[in-house]
Image: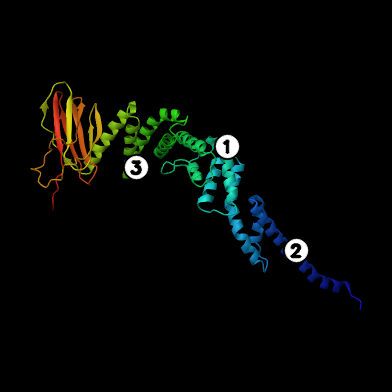
Amino acid sequence: MKITPRRLLVFGVPLVLAGVIGYQYFNLQQNLNQGLAAYQQGDCATALPRLNNVVNSSLFGAKNWIDEAQAPRAACFDFQPAKDAQNAGNYGDALYKYFELVVGKRDATLFPFVKAEVAKIFSEVPAAEWATYDNCGWHNYKNIATYFDEEGMLPEPAKNIPALFYECGQYLLNIESPRDIELFKAAESYIALLDQYPDHPLTLEVVSQLPQVMLDAARGYLENDNPAYKADGMAMLTLLMERFPDHELANEAEAQLAKVIAENATAQGADQMPQPQAIAISGTNAVVTIQNGSPTPIQVAISGPNDSVVDTLPECLACVQFTDSNAATCGAGVPSASYTLSPGTYQVTVSSLGDTIIPFYGSWRLDGGFEYPNCIFVVTTFQ
């Protein structure tokens, strides 16, 4: 039987279609195999386009291959931006992207490669290039290096952690027009360096900068209407006074803190504290003596034109809360402190550091050559 050219064409079309479809399946399997192999080697730049081809395929019967490609493709999709940032020299950004992979989307296959790249950056790249806003100023005096160290991923922790604390402080302070939060985070980075690595050579430079940074950070927080920010600002002032008691800025910090304590007390509806009866003494200064006749520690804050005091008196172990104010008194041996002040009008605030007791506040005119003794006690009333 003689076959005409037309019949040859009819018979050839199915064969061509079968060949094309077969090639598509073969090519899809090749993409899957090559993509998975690259993924296993941490080469997501090679793996992603191949795995994308598989996942986006509409071939009938390819569901198993598509399912097999989904998880590796997703892992590479997260990994590759970090690698791209690293290759582009954006090392701080790369570190944070690697951190996100470790803390949230850790992939068992890619994790060794993440670990290797993190170690490479910390080993080969200068510390100044690690510092970014995301990598600095974490809570609890940490940064991204301390996190990687906790995960066992940081080479030379004793070198790299203090280096990043220092560089974070520098980075945050050198932001154009730094906000209060940047100043506060910079102070915390420097404090962490001093606390955790007191013998590190960088501490000498930090000590010279830190008091001013702490004072500026505290002032900014104290101007914020948020009570939590105000509390942090007061804590920073207290820390400045404790760490640098002989620094010239410690007096400024004490004056600012005493003023804020008085403002807070009046805002809370503080009980009025009448000016004590004066006792003549020798000299030209005034002396305020506070006795703590209560079973809780108290804070004394005195704010005036020339002098300021913020102090804490311990609890009186032998004292009790009274129920009758007429019977309340300070006996012998109670904790006390005397403060020598230049004459003037002072805001005097006394707050309990134990129970939730309304603070006492008074505006006192203090004259030179007089002592002003005051006994603090607690009276419990029942309503």
Q: Nearer the viewer, residue 54 or 379?
A: 379
Which class describes the residues within 10 Å of circle 1: few (<14), some (14-19), or many (20+)? some
Q: Residue at x 74, y 66 (%)?
A: 21
Q: Farthest residue toward the top?
A: 283
Name the residue type under label 3: Tyr
x and y percentages locating residue 235 in the rendered image:
33, 38
Instruction: Locate residue 325, reporting x and y percent.
Output: 10, 44
Q: How is the image coloured?
A: rainbow
Residue found at x 70% / y 62%? 29
Element under disc 2: helix
Query: For mark 3, what is the residue?
Result: 229
Residues marked 3 and 1 touching at CB (< 8 Å): no
- Between tags 1 and 2, which lies in front? 1
Q: Amino acid at mark 1?
A: Val
- Between the residue at mark 3 and the residue at mark 2, the CA separation in whole angstroms equals 66 Å
Looking at the rendered structure, the kind of residue marked 2 is Tyr
Residue 23 marker: 2
Residue 183 in the image: state x and y as whole percent: 41, 36
For marks 3 and 1 on the same chain, the one whose residue lies earlier in the sequence: 1
Q: Secondary structure at mark 1?
A: loop
Q: Earlier in the sequence, mark 3 or mark 2?
A: 2
Query: Marks 2 and 3: in contact by CB < 8 Å?
Result: no
One can see residue 7 in this view: yes
In the rendered image, which quarter is residue 54 located in?
Answer: bottom right
Q: CA distance from mark 1 to mark 2?
A: 47 Å
> Of marks 1 and 2, which one's residue comes earlier in the chain?
2
Q: Is residue 156 left or right of residue 324?
A: right
Residue 300 lies in quadrant? top left
Quarter placement of the N terminus: bottom right
Determine the secondary structure under disc 3: helix
